[in-house]
Image (cartoon, grey):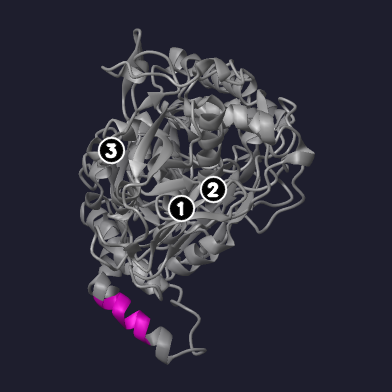
């Protein structure tokens, strides 16, 4: 029996892994890996048809255009007269990513179809319709934070339309989901059936396919904290110099638990960014039959497979055949992303659950491109539920992302880990816009703009870690891509971008602060800054620059603070060497968000001695209980009326882009902006 003889060979998985790790160090060059087992597989008594994909995180246009024909491939194979009943559909991660598709899912057009308005939920709806049973946790799944992923997976309803939430679990055996509040609330029981784990996070799951139980184990790259927003999740191994043996040791217990329950067909859904890691990992795992790789966009295939339009060849043969730690057969598979290819692995197992290599047929197996000729071969039908969501998303993108407001030639950094820890060019752009807008409409000059980094929800453009990389410093930062479908050129900043990044569209207000009170506000702004923290109160400023010492006690961190002229020269030194300069009672007028003025992020605006608050919007805007006096609302430039309200920060940025950066030759071009100096942690 497969499991009995492996257990005899290995004793315990942990002990064997330790021995292998030592041998790897001491016997370099003497052995390339585990020796092939003498076990001879019997005839195939069970056949699995594994359909898999990953990395729907690259080209928005291609992904949306291809998903309907992709769904037809899944349908065709699932109805195959020979193998259809034994079909299992899985993903190896990176199913969602912040961008037009992600945020279009918030809009009414989409909610009327799905019942949800959570960003990213449309891709979850696609996966539900495709019949996905489980997914690995990828880095881009977390780019907007664990909370946003949890929201996208959650059930919602509107006007009688119900979104069931994710009908599959996210799996990662080496991720501690209890370390984040949002994921902790959705933790399921490891090793439970996939139906029980729908919409939850776990290490492993079990699915029954044509009468056989298949074990599924998830695994995520240990580099997640360096390449995405993990929100406190702990990914093992935690050491920077981790090895494949270390990674296997973190995954193996979940495999062992499934094997101990009598499951003899186990698949690892891995998202390692480099397929070389999955291949190396195979050598250290026991009782695993298939690894579905993800994150590297490795285009496996051969001469029997058809390429997607524009692709120029195969990276390597499908599947990669290797051995596990005990010398038993193990297959590694991967396909390119963006719904361009559906991986298909038809594989036989003998009575002991061992892969029968002779069952592999390259005419059946490989990367099936989502193109009409392949759809015709399978006889599949397009999934109409997917088409409805696809069209809804495309309609939103066409409407909102075709409304061009201005241009940028650079990536605008709105990543959570950036705007909550340092000044970014997007933070400066929107703070500058608020300051300009306030001066256009103000009854008196406004000196400073203060807003919170937490109010900036995403970037404009793309920051993509190249497939195969695990170093975020290698991320390719690009301005918004041209969209041929709707006719927008590269660098176009649109209504859709502003709706996504300034999602709360807070109202703008002007107020007074003395020099001493201004220092108080800025001390609060940097009070929660510490290694690993991303506090929403962290400021994005215009008309002012500061330095602070994050190692000092909160309340005494500001070391310098200067108010600037429009040309960037220093107009007034408020703090130097950590000491308040000049008359502490001199007054500065500033513009900020009503969210902050009303006490949001615990900003102490209620302690201002004579705030003289005036709103840049009319009446009790944004649900306020008090109707404050207004600035000169008639002075609104009036160039933007398609969305937002007069006095909203979306409106301010739209008006500013139209006025300052209206054409590609006048595009915003400040790649970085760092008026803060963090002296030390």
Marks 2 and 1 sit apart, C-alpha to C-alpha, by 7 Å
Does the magenta portion include 21? yes
Marks 3 and 1 sit apart, C-alpha to C-alpha, by 25 Å
Between disc 3 and disc 1, the foreground one is 3
Residue 15 location in percent, x, y? 25, 77
| Main secondary structure type of the part rendered in magenta | helix
Q: Is residue 15 above or below residue 484?
A: below
Q: Secondary structure at mark 3?
A: helix
CA neighbours of label 2 inside 10 A, class few (<14), some (14 to 19), many (20+) = many
Residue topped by disc 3: 605
Residue topped by disc 1: 418
**Viewer-nearest residue: 87 or 587:** 587
Residue topped by disc 2: 413
Q: Which residues are magenta?
A: 15-22
Residue 368 location in percent, x, y? 64, 40
CA neighbours of label 1 inside 10 A, class few (<14), some (14 to 19), many (20+) = some
């Amino acid at each position: 029996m497969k499991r009995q003889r492996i257990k005899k060979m290995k004793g315990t998985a942990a002990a064997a892994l330790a021995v292998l790790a030592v041998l790897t160090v001491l016997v370099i060059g003497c052995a390339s890996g585990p020796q092939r087992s003498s076990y001879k597989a019997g005839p195939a008594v069970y056949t699995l048809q594994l359909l898999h994909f990953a990395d729907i995180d690259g080209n928005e246009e291609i992904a949306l255009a291809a998903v309907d024909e992709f769904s037809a491939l899944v349908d065709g194979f699932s109805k195959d007269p020979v193998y259809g009943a034994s079909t299992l559909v899985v993903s190896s991660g990176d199913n969602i990513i912040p961008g037009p598709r992600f945020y279009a899912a918030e809009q009414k057009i989409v909610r009327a179809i799905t019942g949800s308005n959570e960003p990213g939920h449309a891709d979850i709806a696609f996966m539900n319709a495709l019949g996905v049973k489980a997914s690995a946790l990828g880095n881009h799944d977390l780019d907007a934070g664990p909370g946003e992923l949890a929201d996208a997976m959650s059930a919602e309803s509107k006007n009688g339309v119900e979104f069931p939430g994710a009908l599959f679990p996210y799996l990662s055996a080496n991720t501690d989901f209890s370390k984040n509040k949002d994921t902790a609330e959705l933790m399921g029981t490891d090793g439970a059936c996939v139906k029980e784990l729908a919409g939850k996070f776990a290490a492993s799951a079990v699915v029954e396919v044509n009468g056989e139980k298949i074990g599924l184990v998830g695994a995520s790259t240990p580099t997640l904290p360096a390449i995405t927003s993990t929100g406190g999740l702990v990914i093992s191994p935690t050491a920077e110099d981790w090895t494949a043996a270390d990674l296997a040791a973190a995954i193996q217990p979940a495999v062992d638990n499934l094997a101990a329950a009598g499951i003899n067909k186990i698949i690892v859904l891995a998202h390692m960014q480099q397929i070389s890691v999955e291949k190396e990992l195979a050598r250290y795992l026991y009782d695993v039959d298939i690894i579905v790789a993800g994150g590297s966009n490795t285009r496996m295939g051969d001469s029997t497979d058809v390429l997607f339009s524009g692709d120029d060849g195969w990276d390597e043969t499908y599947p990669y055949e290797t051995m596990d730690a005990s010398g038993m057969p193990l297959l590694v598979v991967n396909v390119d992303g963006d719904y361009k290819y559906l991986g298909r692995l038809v594989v036989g197992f003998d009575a002991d659950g061992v892969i029968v290599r002779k069952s592999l047929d390259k005419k059946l197996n490989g990367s099936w491109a989502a193109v009409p000729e392949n759809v015709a071969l399978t006889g599949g039908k397009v999934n109409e539920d997917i088409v409805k969501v696809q069209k809804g998303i495309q309609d939103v993108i066409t409407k909102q992302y075709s409304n061009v407001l201005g241009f940028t030639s650079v990536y605008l950094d709105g990543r959570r880990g950036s705007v909550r820890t340092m000044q970014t060019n997007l933070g400066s752009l929107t703070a500058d816009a608020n300051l300009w807008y306030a001066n256009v409409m103000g009854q008196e000059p406004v000196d400073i703009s203060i807003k919170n980094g937490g109010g900036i929800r995403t970037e404009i453009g793309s920051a993509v870690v190249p497939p195969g990389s695990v170093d975020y410093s290698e991320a390719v930062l690009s301005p918004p891509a041209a969209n041929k479908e709707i006719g927008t050129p590269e660098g176009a900043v649109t209504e859709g971008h502003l709706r996504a990044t300034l999602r709360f569209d807070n109202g703008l207000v002007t107020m007074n602060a003395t020099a001493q009170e201004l220092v108080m506000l800025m001390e609060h702004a940097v009070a929660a800054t510490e290694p690993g923290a991303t506090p929403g109160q962290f400021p994005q400023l215009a008309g002012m620059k500061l330095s602070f010492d994050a190692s000092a006690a909160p309340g005494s961190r500001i070391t310098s603070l200067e108010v600037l002229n429009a040309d960037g020269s220093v107009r007034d030194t408020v703090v130097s060497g950590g000491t308040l300069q000049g008359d502490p009672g001199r007054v500065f007028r500033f513009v900020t968000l009503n969210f902050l003025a009303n006490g949001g992020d615990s900003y102490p605006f209620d302690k201002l001695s004579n705030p003289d608050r005036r709103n840049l919007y009319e009446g009790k805007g944004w649900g306020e209980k008090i109707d404050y006096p207004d600035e000169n609302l008639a002075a609104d430039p009036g160039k933007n009326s398609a969305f937002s309200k007069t006095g909203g920060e979306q409106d301010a940025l739209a008006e500013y882009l139209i006025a300052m950066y209206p054409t590609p030759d006048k595009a915003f071009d400040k790649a970085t902006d760092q008026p803060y100096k963090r002296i030390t942690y």
